[in-house]
Amino acid sequence: MSETSILVVEDEEKIARVLELELEYEGYKVVKAKDGLEGLQYIREQKWDLILLDVMLPGMSGIDLLRRIRTGDDQTQVIMLTARDGLDDKVTGLDLGANDYVTKPFQMEELLARIRATLRVGGTKQSADFLELANLKVKEATHEAFRGEKELQLTAKEFSLLVYFMRNQRQVLSREQLLDHVWGYDYYGDTNIVDVYVRYVRNKIDKGYEPHLLHTVRGVGYVLKDPR
């Protein structure tokens, strides 16, 4: 089995070196790029399993590089590295197709866990068009979702929540995680909003269908999985 390849696009040498050492210790094949232009060159030269992409880069920003990546590639997994106050960057990155983001400064164990999760999700993507689980299909580009042959009618927020579940299949997600990724880390409203929208989504994707896919893990959160 070939090694999982990770491209680290990070201009801060100290951070890049730590990432390189930690990832190589975990068994990944790692290449570093010191700026956006060098990152683009490496991306053109070969296919990567995952790209760790800093937002603030010289030469070409991480956002611009992500836009280049997604122009011709919907499948490479991309995790953005963003500043703590970079909400606009996070929103823009996710809208452009980033699979996840990690806020600096970060704990290495959290980053490694997110890498593992993102790589697992990459294996669930059946084609460049759809995210699939059982007979549930989600097409992000056109904002469509289907259960079997029936198209599901979802609001924008319900669709965003479903996409996040689909990207993290078989993982138990806490209310805090869902609130952070779907509503934004600076959301100050009632956290019960998560439960409300999970109920909305569950009614639309599971009611009248078998098997049920969206499950409650009591005291922890929710998980999207095929129980069979």
Image (cartoon, helix red, strand yellow):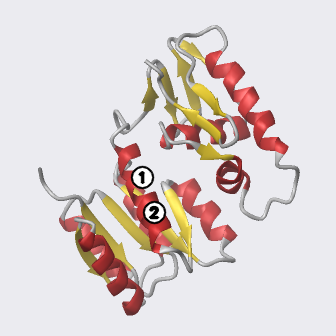
Q: Position of residue 126 (x, y in %)?
A: 34, 33
Q: Which residue is mark 1?
A: 118
Picture quarter with the C terminus: top left
The kind of residue tagged 1 is Thr
In this rendering, the answer to whether 209 lies above or below 189 is: above
Q: Please report contact status of discs 2 and 1: CB closer than 8 Å, yes or no.
A: yes
Q: Is residue 152 visible?
A: no
Residue at 56 percent across and 78 percent down: it is: 104
Spatial CA distance of label 2 from label 1 is 8 Å
Circle 2 packing at 10 Å, graded few (<14), some (14-19), many (20+), is: many
First in sequence: mark 2 vs mark 1: 2
Q: Which residue is mark 2?
A: 79
Residue at 38 percent across and 60 percent down: it is: 69
Q: Is residue 200 visible?
A: yes
Residue at 54 percent across and 10 percent down: it is: 210
Q: State which mark lies toward you, 2 or 1.
A: 1
Q: Position of residue 95 (x, y in %)?
A: 58, 54
Q: Position of residue 125 (x, y in %)?
A: 37, 38
Displayed quadrant of residue 23: bottom left
Q: Left or right: 32 with respect to 161?
A: left
Q: Left or right: 136 with respect to 201?
A: left
The front one of 48 and 195 is 195
Q: Position of residue 11 (x, y in %)?
A: 40, 87
Q: Secondary structure at mark 2?
A: strand
Query: Which residue is outermost to the top?
Result: 208
The front one of 71 and 192 is 192
Q: Which mark is residue 80?
A: none
In this rendering, the answer to whether 57 lies above or below 189 is: below
